[in-house]
Each structure stands twice: as structure tokens, then as C-alpha cells.
Amino acid sequence: MKKPIVGIIMGSDSDLPTMQEAALILDEFGVPYEMKITSAHRTPNFMAKYSSSALKRGIKIIIAGAGGAAHLPGMSASHTPLPVIGVPIKTKSLDGLDSLLSIAQMPGGVPVATVAIGGGKNAGLLAIQMLAISDKGLMKKVIEYKKKLEKESLKKNKAVSN
Amino acid sequence: MKKPIVGIIMGSDSDLPTMQEAALILDEFGVPYEMKITSAHRTPNFMAKYSSSALKRGIKIIIAGAGGAAHLPGMSASHTPLPVIGVPIKTKSLDGLDSLLSIAQMPGGVPVATVAIGGGKNAGLLAIQMLAISDKGLMKKVIEYKKKLEKESLKKNKAVSN
Amino acid sequence: MKKPIVGIIMGSDSDLPTMQEAALILDEFGVPYEMKITSAHRTPNFMAKYSSSALKRGIKIIIAGAGGAAHLPGMSASHTPLPVIGVPIKTKSLDGLDSLLSIAQMPGGVPVATVAIGGGKNAGLLAIQMLAISDKGLMKKVIEYKKKLEKESLKKNKAVSN
Amino acid sequence: MKKPIVGIIMGSDSDLPTMQEAALILDEFGVPYEMKITSAHRTPNFMAKYSSSALKRGIKIIIAGAGGAAHLPGMSASHTPLPVIGVPIKTKSLDGLDSLLSIAQMPGGVPVATVAIGGGKNAGLLAIQMLAISDKGLMKKVIEYKKKLEKESLKKNKAVSN
Amino acid sequence: MKKPIVGIIMGSDSDLPTMQEAALILDEFGVPYEMKITSAHRTPNFMAKYSSSALKRGIKIIIAGAGGAAHLPGMSASHTPLPVIGVPIKTKSLDGLDSLLSIAQMPGGVPVATVAIGGGKNAGLLAIQMLAISDKGLMKKVIEYKKKLEKESLKKNKAVSN
Amino acid sequence: MKKPIVGIIMGSDSDLPTMQEAALILDEFGVPYEMKITSAHRTPNFMAKYSSSALKRGIKIIIAGAGGAAHLPGMSASHTPLPVIGVPIKTKSLDGLDSLLSIAQMPGGVPVATVAIGGGKNAGLLAIQMLAISDKGLMKKVIEYKKKLEKESLKKNKAVSN
Amino acid sequence: MKKPIVGIIMGSDSDLPTMQEAALILDEFGVPYEMKITSAHRTPNFMAKYSSSALKRGIKIIIAGAGGAAHLPGMSASHTPLPVIGVPIKTKSLDGLDSLLSIAQMPGGVPVATVAIGGGKNAGLLAIQMLAISDKGLMKKVIEYKKKLEKESLKKNKAVSN
Amino acid sequence: MKKPIVGIIMGSDSDLPTMQEAALILDEFGVPYEMKITSAHRTPNFMAKYSSSALKRGIKIIIAGAGGAAHLPGMSASHTPLPVIGVPIKTKSLDGLDSLLSIAQMPGGVPVATVAIGGGKNAGLLAIQMLAISDKGLMKKVIEYKKKLEKESLKKNKAVSN
């Protein structure tokens, strides 16, 4: 098994259904990853250690999902020079608007690459695109993936044409 | 000078005008405090160290102010068993709604005692009330403070009576 | 049975499921409490009497839950020098955003320690933390509780490790 | 001077500019009123006493203005059988959305007749309309007032006609 | 059967469940009313005629419910000197926030007495309170109603006392 | 002077700066229009008469601007079979979100073609596009207008090219 | 079969239930249309080609539905001089508020005629109204349609009359 | 002068002050870039051509800023396999909430790496971090940059220490 180069982390195992969509994309593109549950609030030291050691351990991108007062993506970003992708998890009370604002509204100096509420799949794709900057083979796959999306969308027209 | 028992922390010196209102209240009640700028995002290690050592150093309550993706109060709370009071700082783009949601919507297990947007003064008062639980002298002062508020409010009626 | 030192109040018995989570935490930490239904709007006199007599009766903290135009926490705070913790109850129409704003946005002079929408459990924990300021045994339990949270969170990694 | 039949109350003297618009309307219609500063939070007992004695003192309608966690209208309504008109005051952080929700979202059993954010003038008019239900002279004035509004609006067409 | 003095109108029969709560209250207080479906958008002329003739026909108060771009309460108010109570109906997409803003944010000169989202019951009570200004018997009933609410709320304490 | 085929109406003369942008566009395209101040709330009869007679008088499109509980566009649409374009005017308290929801969220059967908050210019353009459906000369001008926009935008690149 | 003069496009087949309501209206009025799935994001070239060739192909109006970061209506409008009607599709996380803002808040120069969230039916009607500007037969049908709406609404009064 | 590897694009020259903060960061890190004004709405073909040719021309990352119905980042992402960073520009009416939702809420398959409202600086930093994945020298600079931020923040404590 190959050494992981993407770290998928989430605050709670209830975030797993959303974050597994990121994993599925990485699997599809053949990019090795690791998956951890590390809460900014319940395991702040593990989160800090995981994030600050990620570069050394060969991780190139961190994908972090969290809901509500969603601090995991931003805190992970504060502990690592690696790009961090934040996934706002849909919440029961405010439908994820709280998660979105808690993740996107980062102060100058510490960015988080925020995707849509519940956007696990796009988080995976964004990680692939970042890696593809310096990996021609992967870039080719991204181009093919986009073509496949296009074809599938065009094909759906058969069902609606009147 | 007495040893501080309240720690006032904030993410940036631009939060100072709001947070100094907390300090003024503590001064008024004679409660010693210390004030630090420690950003969850720019100085995560100092923040973690400050928060996790606070109890040992004699701090009893932490008041934390932050704006936007306001992670300082929640992260401080994750590193200390002490009660943490969160002050959502008003922001330029979303007027502090982002700060409020980022601070109040904490997950089960790690509470933050959130006050109003820009509520530095009330953060100071809430700290006093917490301390007054086990300090009769301070409780007496709180009772007097509330009476003073009442009198001042009643007195304003002279100006509006027609 | 020990004399209650925390008062859990709520506007309606429909708030009970949320507020009982606060009670469960107090039970877990061995802190005696009382629970009352007292609506700011339907029983304003009982609410005022309950709140203004709380200190004398040995209550140290009030936890108040309410939804919609949630006035109970703020009104209880106006009648007592004790710290009041406000729990915004999730509502049918606006999902608790109305409750959150009605509780958190208190004016200078009368703070309410607001927790997350539906945050009964965290309200209980915050009360414990406030009491632990002057109770070393309780503080030890808070530290242990946080360690337990940490362990449980770390343990969940076994299920997701690939 | 005639005995007041409308009570205009507000939480703070900073609400005066908005609430004086209600007073101007009452003056215009010749309806006697009184104006008081009584905060639900700073003077809860005065507020309760004022509201619960209003009917006996000859007051027929209460107009209450408040901002933020705006509890004054709802609390006044809880203490009196009289109709209460609530005026959400514009706030610095959330522009009065907090005030609007805190006033309008009252639970079943205790209504508050809520007007627009900053709607002092309409609060005065609504009070007049309520009184006019049983006062033919006043109803005639309301009808004339509406005609005047209509005329003034129509007249403005001269300026824009091209 | 007595001549109706309150008109309950609504934009669509889907609003009936909410508006019938107003009718139930009027029944309980023995106040005769009529109920009409008249849409500001689908039957603007009937709405205008209904509203502008209401005073002459002996109607004293109009209760109007509508959802979404909820124009019925405001338009009814523009056609009558009578007080109009607006009930924001909960909507599928925005949960009634659109209805609340469309009803409450009326311009100076034409007030609508807005109640909570889905607040049919409170609309009925508010109408009763307006009528009670000049009807001592009704005022007595309002006082009794409030006492009943109080008793029922206090009684619920038996279930929660520990 | 040519007979107007577009009617620009607005609730108040304070809406004029926004609505004049629509007029400027119509001038630019040589489409004759009339401009009226007609408030849904202050002049409901003039509004109804204006809207219901518009088709007969040769008007083909109505552009209606209003703010807050913005009922003018929807009410005008209820009185005419003509297409109505709604312009949400920016408001002091809620920045036009109230206007946008009051105009866009129309019920099935009575559409309003809503443009952006403050979008007077786009309302004018949309009217032109509607007319251009059956007017080749006008369609040509729309195509040229879009080309001009494109050129101007491209030209701005000279200033930023580094 | 007649040549289509309205193009109904949508970003995904999951938008079909909403957009078919537009088709049903066009069927009812006898206006020929075509229906396509063309995503601004997955098939940007097909979308651009479809939109920029629409005028030439005899299309007179485009109705475009999309959800979330709903770019289809605005992008279609950028590629065609024809009027574009935008339908904000209700979304899982933010209930369509994101769709509404993404469609309505277009910049000066490129309008989109936005209808309500989920307003497929009104999009169809608005298209009919635009076509009816220059088609007396269609205008007659619109007038009849509005009369039918009126009758149906009035008829519902039988069920509620007490 | 070196060939640009980052493309900074924006919808209008009014976005320049925000986007130039991205350029300043790229300058500071010595990363060559180009800056273009290309509106999704006014120059859709230039936008499409710019985006779809970017990879071939050696561009590795696109930073796109837009406000309101902010379609530029998402449309650019639909035309290129490269990672696209979206900067929501603050708007006059809705303060950038519309921009944020229009950029972040992208559908599955086409991610945009969204930063905070007005977050030009962080967009630049995020681009640097993406490039640093495969550029050790750049990664070292990122680490130094974060250390500098830390030092500057810590230094500010001198001013507040009491």
C-alpha cells in the first residue's frame, strides 16, 4: 500500500458520510490518503500534532470537515504550511450556514480553501487538482474526469427531449 | 499588584477597543486580570500553552474575543477546564453574525459562554458573576452594581417626562 | 437529598428534552439541582420571584432555556445577581436563530452566558465549570471529563483507519 | 392637561428618536400619552409595575420600543391584558433583525403587535387605529389622515412627470 | 347569529390551518367573525372591496394571513382605516422569514400589527385585546384568560419536580 | 413625442435615483415611457387603476420599484396581464433583503420578473429585451449594447496589465 | 409539431420536477418549447453554444433553472440578447436562498428575470406574458387565465364561509 | 520577466483593490502572475477562452474575484482542470453574503476553493501553498511567513501588557 499524501480529518464520526465522498474521489484517482477523526475541541493536542507533523510525514494536502462552530479546518491550517481544504458539514439547527461561515471567514494570513456545505466530493476533487499542478498524469485524469461529467450531462438530454 | 485571576485574550489588537470594556469592568470591581493578544490562527502554540497552563497559573476564567471565523474562544475552551467567555467581535463584512455563530455553536462537551456581538462589557460582568458565586463580597458588589443600573435608568425618566 | 445549587428553568414543557441534557450532566457530576417550568410570558411573577429569590435560597447558577422570542434567560438575569446560562431552543419556523439572537444580544449590564442552539448538555457543563472555579474536587472531575472525551474521540479512529 | 391613555415606553434613552415619532403622531391626533424609560433588564420591577398597573391607571394601549435582545414589548405584554405594540429598534451590529425576531416571535398566548424596524410612526398610528375602533371622531381623523397621505403621494407625480 | 365584527382573511385555503387558530380564539371569547379567502394577487378587486367596505359593514378589525411575498395584510391595511393584524404563514422554502419581512416592514403611514410566523392564535388574542379596550366584559375575560395560562403553566411543574 | 409603451412606477420619490437608471436605459434605446409615483399602500386605488388600465392605454411592460414590505410590483402584476419587472430598493435597516423577498417570492399564478437589489438599470434592459422579442431593430440594438459592454470591459485590461 | 420558441434549460435532471411546471404552463397556452439539460459547470460549451445560437434558431425566451451556486441563468443571459427567466431551485442545505441570490444579484448590463424559489410555474407564465406583448391572442388567454385564477379563488370561499 | 504561473482575474475594475492584495502576496513570494479583467457576464467568450487556454499557457492556478451573483470563479472552474480560488467581493447591498454563497455553493464535480469575503490576501497565500506542494523552496518561504506572522502577533503583546 502506498504512503498517504492526503490527510482526511473530521471532528466526529457523524461527519463520516460526507467525508467518505472525498475518499471515494481520491480512490477513483488513485491517490493514497489516510483518514482520521480528530476534533479541534475534544482532541486539540492530537489535532495540533497531526497537523504540524503532516508535512514531515509526507502529507501534501489536508481535507478537514467540521460542523457548527467548525474550527477544525482553520486550526489545522494554523498548524501546517500545507493547503487545507475545509468542508462545512450540514447542521441540524442552522443547516450548515454556521459551518460555512466558521470555515470560510478566516483572517488574513491563514487561508482555508472552503467548498460547499456538504461538499465532500468537491473537496476530494480540489485536492486532486492541487496535486495535478505538478503531476501531468493526474492532470490528464482531471481533464478526462471533466469530459466524463460533460458526457453524462449531455446524455441526460435524451430523457428530457420532447 | 495582585496576581491576575482573569485572562483577557483576543485574536488581534484591532479587537482591543471591545475587549478593554471587559477590563474596565474588572477594574471597577477590583478583580486583577491580565491581557494578551494570542491568535488561534497566527499563534496557535502560544494560545494552546496560554490556555492549558491558565488553571495552574491561578487564572479562574478566560475571556476571549475574536471576529469572523472566530476560533479563539472555542480553542481556548478546548485546552482548559476553566470556563471560557466568548466575545463575538463585529466584522466589516457580516457585522459579526459570522463571529457569533463561530463562537456560540460549539459541539457537546466544550461550552463557550457567549455574550452579544461587541459585548466586551458584559463579558467582564459575567466573569464577575462567576467569581461572585463563591465570593460574598463580590456578590454584594454585583447587587450594588445592578441597583446602580436601575437608579440610572429610572433617573433618565426626568428627561422624557412630558 | 442535597439542597439544589443549580436552578434549571424553561419556558414550556416542550423544552424538556433539551433541558434534561443539562440535568443529566449535573447528575453525572453529582451537583444537586432543581427544575422548574416558569415562562417569562405566561408566569412573569413566578419567574421574577423564582429568579430574585434564587441567591437567598442557595442557588448559585441559573440555567434557562427558551425558544422563539426567548425572554426567559434575559429576564431571569435581570432579576438575579447570579450568572445565568441561556439555552436557545430550536424552533419550528426559524430553526432557533430567533432564540439565539433573543438570548445572546443582551444589552450592556445584564449578561447571559449563551450556549449553542439546543445546547442543553453544554449548559450543564458550563455550570459545572463555573462551580469548579472554587471547588477543587469538581475541577478535577472536569479535567477527567475532558480526558474521557479525548479518549473516546481518539478511540473512534479505529473504525475509520484504512 | 388630559390623562394619558397611551403609554410609550422604551428600554433606553437612545431609543428616544425612534419613539418620539410615535409621540408626534399621538400629538397630531390629539391623543394624550405618557412616555417612560423602563428597561426590561435594568428596571424589571418598574417595568412589571408600570405594565401591570397600566389598565387601572387608565392606559388603553402600551407602545414599547427596544433593540437587540428586545424583551420590553413581550415582557410588558406578559404583565398586562392591554394590547402592546412593539417597535424593533435598529441595532448597530445586526441592523435590527435581532430586535425584530425578539419582538415578533412571541409564543402562543401573549401577542405583541409588531411594526417595522424603526417604525415608531406606525406604532403611533396603529395605536390610533385601535382606539378608533370605538371612537367615531378618531376614526374620521384616521380616514382623513389616509386621504392626506394619498393626496401627498399623488402630488409628487408633478415632479416626476416627463 | 350575531353580525361579525372581526374579518379573518387569507390568501389561500392552504393557510386555513393557521388561520383557524385565530377563529378558535374568537369563538372562545364569543366574538363573532367572518372568514374569507381573498388573495391580494389572485382576487385584488375582491380584496380591495372587502377591505374598503369593512368599516361600513361593521367590521372592527381585520386579521390577514399570507405567505411568501405576503401582500394581503399590507394591502388590506392600505384600503381600510381599521387596524389590520398580519399573520406570516410558514413557507416551504424560507420557513416564513419571507412572509415575516413582507408583512412587518411596512412603510410609514400604513401599519400592520404583525404577530409571529404561524401565529394564528396570537392574532385572535390581539384582536380580542383591541376590542377589550372599550369593552369591560371582554377585558375581564382577557384577564381571566391570562390567569388560566398562568395556572396551566404552573401546574406543569408537578411533572418536572424532582 | 411618442406614446409611452413602458410604465415606470415607484412607491415613493425616494426611489427615484434607482428608478431613473431604468429611464436612462429606455432613453438610450429610444423607447418611450412614462414615470409615476404610485404607492401600493398610500394610493392603492391609483395603483390599481394605473395597472389595470395600462394595457388599454398602450403600455406593454410595467417596471415597478419598491422597498421594505415592497408590495407595488406584485400588486401591479395582480391588476394587469402585462409582464411586470420588480426592482427591490435598498433599505436602511435590512439593506434590501426585505425588498428582494417581498418582490421575488410571489405565489403561483402571478409572476414578477425580479432584478437585483437596486437594479434599476437592469430593469430597463430587461424591458428592452422583452420588447425586442418582436422588434428586430431593437434586438439589433441589444446585440450592439452587449458588444459595447464587452469592448469596454476588455479595454479596462490595459489599465491592469502588468 | 411547431418549432419551439421558448427554451427551457436546467443544470441537472434533479431540477426537472420544478422545471416541468413551466412546461405544463406553456403546453396549456399552446406555446411550443424545447427542454434541455445543460449545466453551466459541467457542459459550459454546450450551454454557451445553446444560448448564443438561440436567437438564430427562433427561440424568443430562455427559462433557466439552477440551484446552489446557480450560474446557468446568468451565464445564459451573458451569451444571448434574449430575455432570460431564472428559476432558483430549492436546495438541501440553504433551502434555495443561495440559488435566489446567485440568480437575482446580477451586475448592471446583464439582467435575469428572477422568479420565486421553486417558481417553475411562474417562469412559464412570465414567458407567456412576454410573448403576449406582441400577440393579441395570447394576451387574451392571459387575461382569461387571470380570470380563471380569480374565480377559483373566489369559489374556495364556499368551503370556509361559516 | 518570468512567465506568469498564476492568473488573477476579476469581473470588474472595481474589484481591483481586493484582488491587488493577492498580487502583493505573489510579489512577496516571488511568484510571477498575470492580472486580467474578464467578466463572466460581459465578456463570457474571453472568460471561457482565458480559462480553457490557461493550462496550455503555463498557468497553474487561477484566482478569480467577483461580487453579487458572482459567477466568474465557478465559470472559470468549469472551463479549466486547474484549481480555481474564488474571492467573494464585498457588495453594497448584501455585504458579500450573496458573493460568498454564489461562489462557495458549487455543485459536485466542479469545486471552487473559496476564501473569506474580501479575502484577496488569503487567495494569494492559498495559491502559494498549492504551488509549494511541489516546490521545497516555496514551502520553506511559507513556513517562514507563518513564523513571521507568529512573531508579529506575539510582539503586539508588549502594547497591551498591563
Image (cartoon, coloured by chain):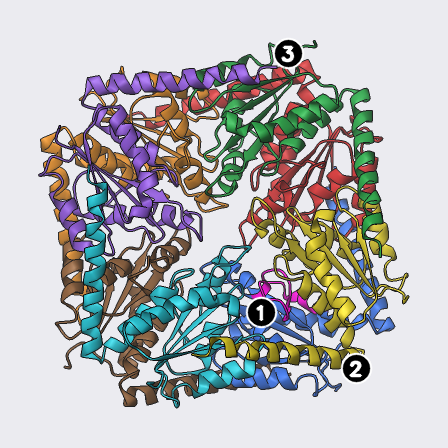
Chain colours: A red, B yellow, C blue, D cyan, E brown, F purple, G orange, H green
- Mark 2, Cα crowd under 10 Å, few <14 / some 14-19 / many 20+, is few
Relative depth, front residue between C123 and A3: C123
Measured as percent of width and height from the top left, residue D7 is found at 40, 79
- Mark 3, Cα crowd under 10 Å, few <14 / some 14-19 / many 20+, is few
Which label was assigned to residue F148? none
**Which chain is home to disc 3?**
H
* Residue assigned mark 1: C17
Measured as percent of width and height from the top left, residue B141 is found at 74, 79
Residue located at (49% from left, 62% from top):
D99
Q: Tag 1: residue type?
A: Pro
Measured as percent of width and height from the top left, residue D29 is found at 27, 73
**Which chain is home to disc 1?**
C
**Which chain is home to disc 2?**
B
Q: Is residue B108 visible?
A: yes
Residues at marks 1 and 3, CA–CA distance in whole angstroms: 59 Å
The answer to whether residue C105 is magenta is yes
Q: Tag 3: residue type?
A: Gly
* Residue assigned mark 2: B136
Please state the extent of the stretch shown in magenta in the rendering: C103-126
Residues at marks 2 and 1, CA–CA distance in whole angstroms: 34 Å
Which label was assigned to residue H58? 3
Q: Is residue C161 visible?
A: no
Q: Tag 2: residue type?
A: Lys
